[in-house]
Image: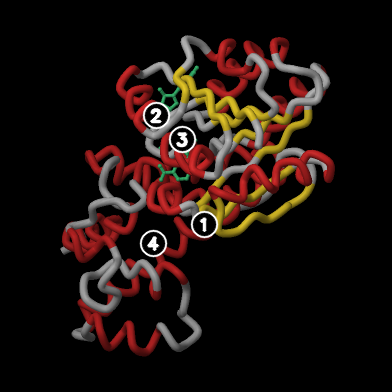
């Protein structure tokens, strides 16, 4: 069993750290928020006074932080203190360029590193069924896999440094675009007098089939577990969708890829967020689209 430093014990980090404790690892945790440290302590995490203290004697360091700037600041701070050969796993969703910089900092200090963002949300973090998308060397991945196991339903090695973040933002760009497409189709169906169920029954088994329709249907009824059935409580908040879409656009610009629908989806989610819906499930964009339809009258 390993000694693991866990830095960033928020909505995702705390349940992930709890699953590492349950698997028998020693977990030394640090966060800036006292309330989060209290939750961690209840889950069996040993609360430390600083990131430095958490990293001392750790075989593995897991970070679950808001954005690239937080990850780079923490890496610059703790990498010089870590034991040579320790493994750094960053599971935050961050931009590809920062992820590559984080790997470079780790390498400079003789550490192994992978970027390993997740999908599956807080529910997946609690259940230990997250999908991990990993980027890094074969050696780093081999060492990381058994550590990720108690937190994971699936672990995919996507390629070299930054490939995990690349996979994450490409996937979420598909998701943002497809949710808008499905929402538009339901709004058009309403105008054409076609029932939600009829559109669902046809499209869910036809060429319009996709996850946004069949697993996360944005109208109440056809998929009882979708957030549309509970007043669009997240789920996956629109604020986080906007964050991921913006990351996709930064990456597209940096890599020179044309992503016109990704750009349009980013604009629409920015407007939806600006209207005060950061905390609404991202499938609630259908209500914004319906509003646009009404405004056309
Ligand atoms: P969160 O805001 O709840 O947690 C982030 C934590 O990091 C906070 O507790 C904050 O205090 C801590 N933190 C910030 N700077 C720190 C520092 N210097 N040292 C120690 N702690 C520090 O966010 P979250 O929902 O847990 O998300 C974490 C990451 O996971 C994000 O990158 C997010 O995009 C990604 N993610 C979230 C979800 C989700 O559904 N919430 C799903 C997939 C991926």
| The N terminus, quarter of image | top right
Distance from disc 4 to disc 3, alpha carbons, whole Å, reads: 29 Å
In this rendering, the answer to whether 225 lies above or below 269 is below
N-term mark: 4 or 1: 4
Q: Which residue is mark 4?
A: 180
Q: Which residue is mark 2?
A: 40
Give the image's coloring scheme. secondary structure
Distance from disc 4 to disc 2, alpha carbons, whole Å, reads: 37 Å
Q: Residues within 10 Å of mark 4 (few under 14, many from 20)?
A: many
Q: Indicate left or right for 279 with 101 as reference.
A: left
In this rendering, the answer to whether 139 lies above or below 285 is above
Distance from disc 3 to disc 1, alpha carbons, whole Å, reads: 32 Å
Determine if the C-beta at disc 2 is less than 8 A from ligand 1.
no
Q: Check whether the beta carbons of the residues at disc 4 and disc 3 lie within 8 A of each other.
A: no
Q: Indicate left or right for 26 with 181 as reference.
A: right
Q: Which residue is mark 3?
A: 13
What label does residue 295 carry, if any? none
Q: Quadrant of residue 182?
A: bottom left
Q: Residue at x 58, y 43 (%)?
A: 117
Q: Which residue is mark 1?
A: 261
Q: Residues within 10 Å of mark 2 (few under 14, many from 20)?
A: many
66 or 173, nearer to the observer: 66
Q: Quadrant of residue 276?
A: top left
Q: Residue at x 27, y 88 (%)?
A: 198
Determine if the C-beta at disc 3 is less than 8 A from ligand 1.
yes
Q: Check whether the beta carbons of the residues at disc 2 and disc 1 lie within 8 A of each other.
A: no
In this rendering, the answer to whether 33 lies above or below 264 is above
Q: Position of residue 137 (x, y in %)?
A: 82, 41
- SS at mark 2? helix
């Amino acid at each position: 069993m390993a000694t693991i430093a866990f830095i960033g014990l928020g909505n995702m980090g705390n349940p992930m750290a709890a699953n590492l404790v349950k698997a028998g690892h020693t977990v030394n945790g640090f966060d800036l928020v006292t309330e989060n440290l209290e939750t961690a302590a209840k889950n069996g995490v040993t609360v430390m006074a600083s990131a430095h203290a958490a990293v001392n004697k750790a075989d593995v360091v897991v970070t679950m932080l808001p954005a690239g700037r937080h990850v780079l600041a923490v890496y610059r701070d703790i990498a010089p203190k870590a034991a040579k050969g320790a493994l750094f796993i960053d599971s935050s969703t961050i931009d590809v360029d920062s992820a590559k910089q984080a790997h470079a900092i780790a390498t400079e200090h003789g550490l192994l590193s992978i970027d390993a963002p997740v999908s599956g949300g807080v529910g997946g973090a609690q259940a230990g069924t997250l999908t991990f998308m990993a980027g890094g060397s074969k050696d780093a991945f081999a060492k990381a896999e058994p550590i990720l196991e108690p937190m994971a339903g699936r672990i995919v090695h996507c390629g070299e440094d930054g490939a995990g973040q690349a996979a994450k933002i490409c996937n979420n760009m598909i998701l943002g675009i497809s949710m808008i497409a499905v929402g538009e189709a339901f709004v058009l169906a309403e105008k054409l007098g076609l029932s939600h169920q009829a559109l669902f029954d046809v499209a869910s088994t036809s060429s319009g089939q996709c996850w946004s329709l069949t697993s996360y249907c944005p109208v109440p009824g056809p998929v009882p577990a979708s957030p549309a059935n509970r007043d669009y409580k997240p789920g996956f908040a629109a604020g986080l969708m906007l964050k991921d879409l913006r990351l996709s656009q930064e990456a597209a610009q940096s890599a020179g890829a044309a992503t016109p629908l990704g750009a349009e989806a980013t604009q629409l989610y920015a407007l939806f967020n600006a209207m005060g819906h950061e905390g609404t499930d991202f499938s609630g964009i259908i209500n914004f689209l319906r509003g646009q339809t009404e405004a056309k009258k």
